[in-house]
Amino acid sequence: MPLPERPLPDTGDDDASLPGLPVRFGISALVMAGMILLAVVLVSVGWWGARQVLLDMAERSAEDAGRIMTERSRRIIDPAVATLRQLAFDPITQAGTLDERLTRIAAFSIDMVANPLVSAVYVGYPNGDFLLVRALRGAAQREFFAAPAATAFLVQTITVNGAGQPKGQYRFYSAELKLLALEDQPAYRFDPRTRPWYASADRSLAPAISAPYVFFTTRQIGISLSQRARNSDAVVAIDMTLDDLAASLGNLRLTPHSELALVDENDKVIAYGDMGRVLEQDGDNFRFRSLAELDVSSLSLLSAKSRAGEQRALYDVNGREWLGLSLPFNVIDGHTLNLLIAAPGDELLGQLDRNRKTLVLVALLLVIAFLPLGWWAGRAIGRSMERLALQAGRMSRFDFRTQDRKRSVLREVNMLTQMVDHVSLTVEAFLDISAILSTEIHVEEMLQQVLEKFVQATRCDGGAVYLWQRESRQMQRAAAYGQQCGLTDTMAYEEHGPAADMARETDDNRLRVELDLRGRNGSLEGLLVLMHAHDSAHEDPRFLAFARRLSGMLAVAIETRQLIAGQKALLESLIRLMADAIDAKSPYTGGHCERVPHLAIMLVESLEQERDGRYADFSLNEDQRYAFQLAALLHDCGKVTSPEHIVDKATKLEVIHNRIHEVRMRFEVLWRDAELELLHQYLPALAPAQAEALRLRLEERRKRLHEDFAFVAQCNVGGEAMSEQAIAQLRQIAAQTWQRHFDDSLGLADEEARRLAAARGGQPAPALPQTEQLLADRPEHMVAWDEEHRPAVERDDPRNTLGFNMKLPRYRQNMGELHNLTVRRGTLTEEDRFAINNHIVQTLVMLKSLPWPDSLKSVPDTAANHHEKMDGTGYPRGLLAGDLPLQDRVMALADVFEALTAADRPYKPAKTLSESLRIMAFMCRDRHLDADLFRYFLRSRLWRNYADDMLRPAQRDEVDIAGIEALLAPLPA
C-alpha cells in the first residue's frame, strides 16, 4: 500500500499558516507545571511520612500475630510433652508379654481423651514388638479400619515369636474399654526399631520432636514426639494433630486479602489458611506442596527475600505493592520454621490514598490562581521554540541527530511533530523493506516490493531497478514504480565506471539519480534509478548519501538471492551429473536414473491436482516438491559402489576373471594334443577291428561331451527356473574328472593367491598331475567377509545406526561353479543379490552423511525407501506401510514399473504394458506395493503417457484395466 504523500515543511517566515497557539499562551502552562511540581513534592513528602507510619504499625501488628500463633502452638505441644514424660515411667514399657501390655491401655486411652489433639500413643520394644492405641474419632476413621460401630479405640499390636516371625493384630474397644472384636492382620508388619522416631529417642527430659507431616490414616497435620523409657529400652511416642495451628492462620490476617503461611527451611508449606491447596495426594501417600506449587506470588517473593536476609520487605507483585514480614517460628525444637505474613499495601494505606486526592485538588486550585504569571516570559521561551522547530526541519532532510516526538498545543511544537511524522513514515518503510528482504524468495517480486517502499521512504516520485546482465553487458529493467520519464527496458552501462554523484534533469523537469548496486565483493549486481522533484530536501547532498547507504541493502539482497539460486542450480546439476554417471556406468541400465524421476514426478504432480477422493488433501509446498525431485534423481546414487560385473551379470558364471586360468587350460589342451599326436602314430599298428572300436568309442564320448556342454551352457543362461532334475543332472556332469598337469598357483593376483593358500591350509601344492572335477565349488572360490568390507546392515550390529534390517550372506562373494550354475532363477546368487541390494544401503549412508538443510531433510529417506514393501519385508530397513509417506510409496511404484518395462536389462526381456501392470497387481495383492496408489495409477492412465515417451512400440499393447484391477483386493466398504 503506498504511503500518503505529505508536503515538505518550510522553515521560513510563512509559519503562521500552521495551526496552534502563539508561544506566549504557553507560559501559563509553564507556571502551572511549576506549581504542580511544587504541589506534587509537598503531597509526596506528606504522603510518604504517613505511609511509613502505617507500615510500621502494620509491621508491629504482624509481629504480634506471630507471637500469638507461637503461644497457641506451644499450648498445643507442651501438654503432650508432659504426657510423654509421664508415659516414659509407665509399667507398659517393661511388660514382656502382650497380655501384660494390654492391661495398661487404659492409661493410654485416658491421655487421648484428655488431649483431643493426640492422635495415637504407641510403644516400640527392643525385640521388635509394637503396641499402638489410636482414638477412632468419627465414622470416617471407623470405616477406614472396618471397625464396629461402637468402637472408640483401636489397639494395633505386633509380636515377634521365638523364630523371629512377626504377628499383627487389631483389637477394637468401646469407650469403656470393652473388647468388641479381634482381627489378625497378616499384612500388618513392620519393625519399629527401623523408624526414625525410635532411633532419635533418648532418656533426656526433652523428647525428640519430628517435623510436621501428614498422618497416613487421619490425613491431619501433625508431629511425632518420642522418648526412651526410664527403666527399659522401649520407646514411647505420641502422634499429635496441629489442626488448630492451621486454623489460626485464617484468624490472624492484618487485612481481608493478607496471606499467611508456615514454611520449613525447604519452602515446604506446613500450614496455610486453605489446607486443601497445601496437601498433595498420590495414592495413599501425602506430601506438603512447596511455595512455588502453592502459586501465591506474594509469599514466594517474600520467602526469596527472607533467604537473602530481608526479614521485612516492600515489594511489587503484578503491579500491586505488598508489605512482607518473615518471623522465626521456634516452637518445634530441632526444626527451623518461618511464619510468612504478607499484606497488600493498598489495603494498609487505603485512607491515606483518599487524603492524597484531596491534597492534589487543593494544589490544582493554587495553580489556577497563579496563571497570570505565565505572560511574563513569553519572548524568551519563544526563541527556544524556534530553535526546536529548525532542528525538526533538519530531521525532515534526513539528518537524524535529534529526535523528539512529544506533541503539544503550541504552534512551533506542532511543526516539530509534523517533521517527526515524516521520519516515522521513513522508519516504517525501512522496517517493511527489511521484512521483504528476509521473507520474499522470488527476486522479481522482492525487487518490486522493495522499490515501492524505497520510493515512499525517500519521498520520490518514481523509480526503477535494473539487473546487470553479464553476458550482454547491459542493464535489464526488473521492477518499476511511479513516474518513469525516460526509463527504457534496457540500457547500456559501464561496469567499472565511476558512480554518479550528481542528479540529472529529465524531460519533465524532474531530477534523476542513478545508484549502482554492488555486492559485498564489489561486483556490479544492478542499478537503482530514482526520480524526484526540485526541492531543498532532495537537492541536499545528505539525501544522496542517505539513498546510497539505503541502496546497499538492496544490493546485498540481490547478491544473496542470486547466490542462493546459483547454489541451488549447482546442487541440482551435480545431482543430475551423478545420476547420468550411474546410468553411464552400465550400458544395461542407461536411462534408469532419468526414467524413474520422470515417472515419479509425473505421478506426484497428478496427485496434487486431485480435488476429490483419497488424495484430495495431498499437496506439496515448493520445498517439499524440490526435495522429492532431488530424492528421485538420487534414488540409486548408491549404485556407484555396486560392482559392474554383478549389475551387468548376463550369465551365471560371469565374474571378474583372471584369464591366466584360460591360458593354463590351453596349455592343458596342448599337453593332451602332444599325447594325442604320439598316440596317432601307433594307430596304424592296431588291428582294423580294434581301431574301429576305438573310433566308435571316441565318437560316443565326443557326442556325450557335446550334449553335456550344451546342457551346462543352457544352465548358464538362466532363462527358465531350474528344476530339481536339472540340478541333479548338472551335479552328475560336474562329477566327471580330468587331470591337471600345470601349477594353478602361478600367475595369480595377490588376493587370489592368498585365498588359494588359505584354502590349502598352508600345505604345499599337491603333486602333479592332479585329478579334479569338471565343475566344482573350490574353497578359493569363497571370498569371506573382512572387517573392512563387512557392511553394518544386520539389526543387532552395534555399528548399525540407521535402522537397517537385512540378512548378510555367509560370503562376500561365492564364485563356485556349481553354486552359480544351480541358481534356480535368473543369474544372481544370494551373494550377488546382496551386492546389488547393498546399493540402497549405500544410498542411505551417503545421503545421511550430507548436511542437508531443514527443507531437504526428507531427501535421504525418500531416496532410500523405494525398495521397502507395505508388509515390512522390504529392504534395507524393513519398514511397514505406516512408516512410508506417500512420496516414498510413489518412488517404490515408479521404480518397479520402470524396472519391469525397461528394455536394457541383460538378464530379462522387456515386458509389455499389460504384463508389467499385471505383475504389479500381484505385488499389490502380496502387499509389496500400495494397492490404493496402484489403483489410482492404473485409472489415471499415466502409464500410457509414460509408454508413449519411453517404451518401444512393441511394448505398447492393449491393457484390460478392469481385468487388472480385479486382481487387486476389493476396496474397503
Image: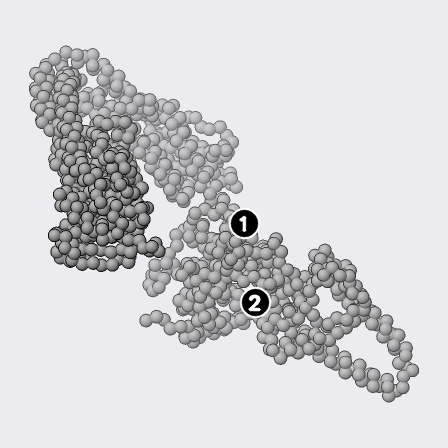
Q: In the image, residue 854 lies at what x, y percent?
A: 43, 47
Q: Is residue 656 left or right of residue 482?
A: right
Q: Is residue 566 left or right of residue 547?
A: right
Q: Is residue 365 left or right of residue 721?
A: left
Between 284 and 545, the one lying in front of the other is 284
Numbered label tally: 2
**Which colour style is shown?**
one colour
Whether residue 51 can be seen here: no
The numbered dot on residue 804 is: none
Rendered residue at 56%/61% (across/down): 808
Q: Secondary structure at mark 2?
A: loop
* Quadrant of image for the N terminus: top left
Kind of residue at disc 1 = Leu
Instruction: Report crowding for label 1: few under 14, some 14 to 19, many 20 or more residues within 10 A (C-alpha).
Output: few
Q: Secondary structure at mark 1?
A: helix
Q: CA distance from mark 2 to mark 1?
A: 27 Å
Q: Earlier in the sequence, mark 2 or mark 1?
A: 1
Quadrant assignment, res 710: bottom right
Rendered residue at 45%/64% (across/down): 872
Between 459 and 758, the one lying in front of the other is 758
**In the current view of this chain or complex, which residue is farthest to the bottom?**
689
What residue is pinned by disc 1? 574
Rendered residue at 69%/66% (across/down): 778
Q: Is residue 365 left or right of residue 871?
A: left
Instruction: Report crowding for label 2: few under 14, some 14 to 19, many 20 or more residues within 10 A (C-alpha).
Output: some
**In the current view of this chain or complex, which residue is farthest to the right?**
685
Mark 2 and mark 1 residues within 8 Å of each other at the beta carbon: no
- Figure check: 498 above or below 861: above
What residue is pinned by disc 2? 903
Q: In the image, residue 868 lies at what x, y percent?
A: 48, 62
Whether residue 805 can be seen here: yes
Rendered residue at 77%/67% (across/down): 665
